Amino acid sequence: MPFLRTREMEKLLTAERLYGEVKSQRDAFATADAEAKEKTSRSQASTAKMKTLTNALQRYDQELQELRSERKDKETKAAMLRSQANTPGLADRKRQVQEDIDRNLEEARELQEGQSRESKISELTGKLNAAEHSLADIEQRAEHVHLQKVGT
């Protein structure tokens, strides 16, 4: 019977060794499982934070686009206002041309009444035609500016 005892002892020792290995593997598995759960939790937190940051970035991009558009509109309006400020007043220019026309007409009448210088009449007639053309051009520009103001 001593043989049985030795054999039983060997089985017992083998069982204890196997139990130790299983326990060690269970502990390793439990540790790995805990680490995996922790990493999953951190991954989920990172994903949520990434989504929040992505949404914020989209909002900032949209806001930037809106600000760029607003800036472009304001620059366009400023350029238009600068152009209008640099253009002499149409009413003043129209008045000046009308005065030139009236003066040229008066000079033409004086020449027709008594002064017989054909070249002077021809010159004044040319000036008169040029002044009338200039007046028509100014009136056309005034109408164009008026239409631009109405369209804005």
Image (spheres, grey):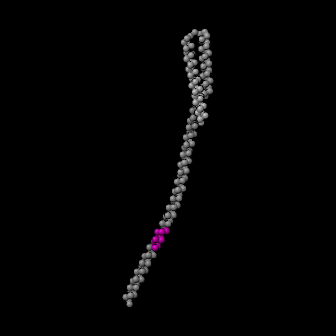
Q: Residue at x 54, y 43 (%)?
A: 68
Quarter occupied by the C terminus: top right
Q: Is residue 76 above or below residue 91?
A: below
Q: Nearer the viewer, residue 144 or 33?
A: 144
- Magenta-highlighted stretch: main secondary structure? helix
Q: Residue at x 54, y 56 (%)?
A: 52
- Number of marks present in the image shown: 0
Q: Position of residue 129 (x, y in %)?
A: 56, 19
Q: Position of residue 127 (x, y in %)?
A: 56, 18
User: Is residue 27 inside the magenta stretch?
Assistant: yes
Q: Residue at x 37, y 88 (%)?
A: 3
Which picture quadrant has residue 131? Answer: top right
Q: Residue at x 40, y 83 (%)?
A: 11
Q: Is residue 144 above or below residue 34?
A: above
Which picture quadrant has residue 84? Answer: top right
Give the magenta-colored segment's residue range.
26-34
Q: Position of residue 120 (x, y in %)?
A: 56, 13
Direction bottom: furthest residue? 1
Q: Is residue 33 above or below residue 92?
A: below
Q: Is residue 67 above or below residue 41?
A: above
Q: Is residue 126 visible?
A: yes
Quarter occupied by the N terminus: bottom left
User: Is residue 93 inside the magenta stretch?
Assistant: no
Q: Image check: 14 left or right of 134?
A: left
Q: Is residue 87 visible?
A: no
Q: Position of residue 110 (x, y in %)?
A: 61, 12
